[in-house]
């Protein structure tokens, strides 16, 4: 992507684009919520769109997003919880149609829509997932995140899931919270994240061309690095296969997420096609790791 050169190798982003506490690090002094996305998309080329899980944006909000996003920027919005967590992918054609129509003006700025399923969505419900994927419009991209433990047993349940995703060329979301849970929570934000974030095995399985990695680290960037390094090797491997992943970096309070993402990007500097981010992002409390 022209505005964010990391994209020739992979896409990089955060779980949000709007955070006032990023002023002075990711955002310049004087930035405000009306132009946060403009500044964000000049550095990172993708973002998790969590707001759509809870409510549809207004038409004017969508128009504002379109006006601020760089041409090659991609939003990866979550499907509404009404579809995934309440209806379990059944009887939700009206909701899906309304959702897609509302976001359609974003056009080429739309990345993969994330179908995040609850941990109660079990292998017995795979036929519902198969029917849902079959009916999805082919002009959009999608990725599925599962949380039921049986989808991580490397048995028939997981094989059927992966075969289904591959058949419909839908990517699989990998949630990596190893760094977060690798040591006792210290800060209040880490304690809160321990309570809320899932703890699942990490299966880096590409079922299409753009697997999504959601990495959740702890508050200590240096400690997180040992869990980020394997992803450097995996991205190098995928690069040889023509697979371009999307990586979203989380931290417990996400205040340090831009710095953690910048550190991760720096770890990839030996790979073909790598270029530096458009902006140097540093947190004074974490300078020792740069």
Image (cartoon, rainbow, N blue to C red):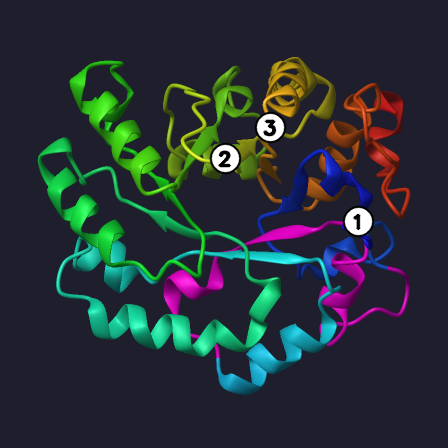
Q: Quick one: SS at disc 3?
A: loop
**Front one among 167 and 279:** 167
Q: Residues within 10 Å of mark 3 (few under 14, many from 20)?
A: many
| Picture layout, residue 29 above or below residue 210 | below
**Nearest to viewer (mark 2 / mark 3):** 2
* Front-lying residue, 159 or 75: 159
Which tag, 2 or 3, sits closer to the chain's start? 2
Residue 166 location, quadrant:
top left
Between the residue at mark 1 and the residue at mark 3, the CA separation in whole angstroms equals 26 Å
CB-based contact (under 8 Å), mark 1 and mark 3: no
Q: CA distance from mark 2 to mark 1?
A: 19 Å
Could you tell me which residue is drawn at 87 percent across and 54 percent down? Answer: 24
Residue holding disc 2: 211
Residue 259 vertical placement versus 97 (above, below): above
What residue did someone put label 3 on? 218
Please state the extent of the stretch shown in magenta in the rendering: 28-57
Q: State which tag comes first along the sequence, 1 or 3.
A: 1
Indicate whether 286 appears above or below 38. above
Q: Position of residue 202 (x, y in %)?
A: 43, 20
Point out residue 75 in the picture as x, y percentages from the top left corner. Answer: 57, 58
* Residue at disc 2, secondary structure: loop
Q: Specify the label residue 4 is tagged with.
A: 1
Look at 25% across and 35% down and name the residue there.
Answer: 164
């Amino acid at each position: 992507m022209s505005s964010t050169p990391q994209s020739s190798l992979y896409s990089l982003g955060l779980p949000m684009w709007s955070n006032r506490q990023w002023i002075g690090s990711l955002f310049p002094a004087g930035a405000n919520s009306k132009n946060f996305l403009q500044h964000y998309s000049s550095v990172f080329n993708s973002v998790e769109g969590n707001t759509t899980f809870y409510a549809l944006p207004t038409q004017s909000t969508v128009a504002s997003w379109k006006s601020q996003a760089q041409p090659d920027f991609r939003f990866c919005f979550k499907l509404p919880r009404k579809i995934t967590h309440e209806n379990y992918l059944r009887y939700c054609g009206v909701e899906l149609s309304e959702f897609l129509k509302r976001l359609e003006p974003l056009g080429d700025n739309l990345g993969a829509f994330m179908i995040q399923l609850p941990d109660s969505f079990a292998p017995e419900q795979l036929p519902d997932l198969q029917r849902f994927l079959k009916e999805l419009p082919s002009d959009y991209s999608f990725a599925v995140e599962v949380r039921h433990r049986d989808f991580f047993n490397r048995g028939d349940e997981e094989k059927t899931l992966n075969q289904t995703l591959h058949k419909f060329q839908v990517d699989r979301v990998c949630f990596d919270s190893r760094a977060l849970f690798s040591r006792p929570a210290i800060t209040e934000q880490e304690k809160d994240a321990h309570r809320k974030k899932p703890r699942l095995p990490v299966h880096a399985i590409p079922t299409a061309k753009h697997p999504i990695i959601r990495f959740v680290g702890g508050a200590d960037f240096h400690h997180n690095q040992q869990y980020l390094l394997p992803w450097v090797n995996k991205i190098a491997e995928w690069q040889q296969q023509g697979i371009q992943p999307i990586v979203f970096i989380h931290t417990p309070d996400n205040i340090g997420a831009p710095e953690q993402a910048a550190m991760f990007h720096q770890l990839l500097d030996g790979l073909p096609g790598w270029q530096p981010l458009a902006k140097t992002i540093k947190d004074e409390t974490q300078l020792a790791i740069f």
